[in-house]
Amino acid sequence: MEKCWSLVVVLTFMMLLAVADAGPNARQCKKERSLVLNACKSVMYGRLPSSYCCQRIRVTHTKCVCPIMTPKVVALVNVNRFTKLVEGCGRRIPRHFKCGSLRIP
């Protein structure tokens, strides 16, 4: 009987971990996008990113940002500058990573 309860506890814990690791929901993604856009607004005007902007870049989920990378948005983005900005803030970008319609070399 005790083994059965141990198994139930372990399975419950594994399910909780799976739910916690599922990633952000739509409302959380909207908030993350808003935070990173507000933190990095000055970068759009050619300035270097602030420490807060870099922190937001490091913690924002790609699942939240990539869906908004439409062809219209990509036309406004200098891919090389974007890559240097993100990597300069300490976030690694995998080779040939595709985010929305943006292909990062």
Image (cartoon, rainbow, N blue to C red):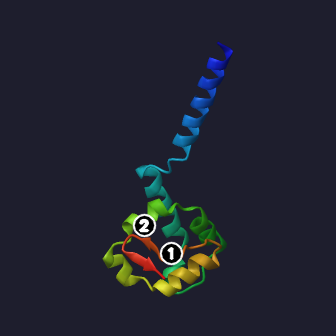
Q: Amino acid at mark 2?
A: Cys
Q: Rate crowding at label 1 as few (under 14), some (14 to 19) or many (20 or more) other CA atoms within 10 Å.
A: some
Q: Nearer the viewer, residue 70 or 1?
A: 1
> Does residue 27 appear left or right of residue 92 in this picture?
left
Q: Name which residue lies at 58% across and 30% down.
A: 11
User: How far across and down, in percent of the image, does residue 79 sit?
Assistant: 46, 84
Q: Quadrant of residue 66?
A: bottom left
Q: Disc 2 or 1, which lies upstream in sequence?
A: 1
> 56 above or below 50?
above
Q: Name which residue lies at 32% across and 77% down.
A: 71
Circle 2/circle 1 CB separation < 8 Å: no
Q: Name which residue lies at 66% across and 19% down.
A: 3
User: How far across and down, in percent of the image, does residue 54 sit?
Assistant: 62, 71
In the picture, the disc for residue 66 is 2
Of the residues tagged 2 and 1, which is closer to the observer? 2
Q: Secondary structure at mark 1?
A: helix
User: How far across and down, in percent of the image, does residue 36 sit?
Assistant: 52, 66
Q: Amino acid at mark 1?
A: Lys
- The residue that label 1 is drawn on is 41
> Does residue 27 appear left or right of residue 93 in this picture?
left
